[in-house]
Amino acid sequence: MSKVFYYDNIEGFEISYDNLFKDLSEENNYFLYCKTNSYYSVFKHIILSLILGEELILLDNDFSKEEINKLIGDENFIFNSKSFKSIGQVSFKDIQERINFNKNNWKITLFTSGTTGLPKKISHDFDSISRFVKRDKKRRDNIWGFAYNPTHMAGLQVFFQAFLNQNTIVRLFGVSRTNCFKLINNLKITNISATPTFYRLLLPPDLICPSLQNLTSGGEKFDSKTLQKLNQMFPNSRIRNVYASTEAGTLFASNDEVFYIKPEISHLMKIKNNELYLHSSLIGKSNSLKLNDNWYQTGDIVDVVTNKPNAFRFVSRKNDGINTGGYKVNPTEVEDVIRLCNGVIDVSVFGKKNSLLGNIISCQVIRSDNTLTEKCLRLFLQEKLQEFKIPRIITFVDSLKTTRSGKLSRNN
């Protein structure tokens, strides 16, 4: 088997699946908690937990001592391991058989990104974590660009899609734009799943990547300008937009901004006051989530496009609204408009506390060159937005702050 992982640095340090299985066969310590910078170590521990039928708890490497103590108790628990007799030499077929045998006892526990407070603990079984994995011979030659944090739901789903089809995995998360393009073209990556924020880091579309066959975007609103630019960079790729969450995994997919609810699961979701609700049967196990008569409030605000068939468009997160001078501003709406301005690569809109207005609308902008000035941007926005929505403070920056899961951060 020649498939490999490229991981941990842009130099392309690699390990074959054969070496991975050798590492597994020699392992005799199992850590319930996985907290590491190494993507390979995370992947290896996921497979090992499946082989043993043990729970695995994934922790972000930058969790502070205070967060860990609040989430799981004494941080020293992380370093406790369980010894076991070496499992012996394994092959991919052996692992598949062990997964099938142990999957009813296995679970993986992860935490939400914590953008609105302390991360919430969610546990999934094998069926829920691999719900949308597609396995067939035509996918055996796929090469995956891994553009997510592996300790979060989106990263896990990409890992299982790649691993169960024995695909090469190449780390792109945290890699510079220049080196990202080098990896995509040199290694002929065929599939990438990432946030719109990640894709915008690849702009402007002055380079072409012909090897890409499938691009998936999720985790944030996917704007039409980004979609247009991606079509230029990846002319041979099919582009899909997905709706997913840590609590439920992937639920919907679309070719544009509109998500259609499949008839077979339409009874497991509802929209109330423009907020999406999911039935508890779609949600992983958790003591951290509040349910109302078996319904979970996602916090996602949506617009209903049609009721027959049921379809909606994502608008924003409920907690993202910024109160300013008696008005409520949707930062996602403002970002979408700013991105339409020529010379804007990406933008983050957020509120700065103010004793008089409550918040001042502010933004940070990545521009393609210095010809875009604050005056030019303000003149553009005056034609597009109401005055109270136009940022009072505009700052040009080289990069934008992101969350642990690779989304735009509004905590500036």
Image (cartoon, rainbow, N blue to C red):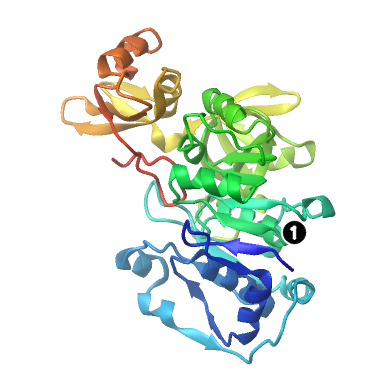
Residue carrying label 1? 165
Q: Quadrant of residue 156?
A: bottom right
Pick the quarter of the image with the C terminus. top left
Give the answer, above or below, for where 320 lies relative to 356.
below
- Mark 1, Cα crowd under 10 Å, few <14 / some 14-19 / many 20+, is some
**Residue furthest left in the image:** 355
Pick the quarter of the image with the N terminus. bottom right
- Give percent across and percent down for residue 140: 77, 56
Q: Is residue 170 visible?
A: yes
Amino acid type at circle 1 is: Asn
Observer-nearest of 260 and 7? 7
Residue placed at 72% from the left, 70% from the top? Answer: 103
Q: Is residue 279 visible?
A: no
Please give left or right for residue 143 compared with residue 301 in the image: right
Give the answer, above or below, for where 241 lies relative to 294.
above
- Give percent across and percent down for residue 268: 69, 43
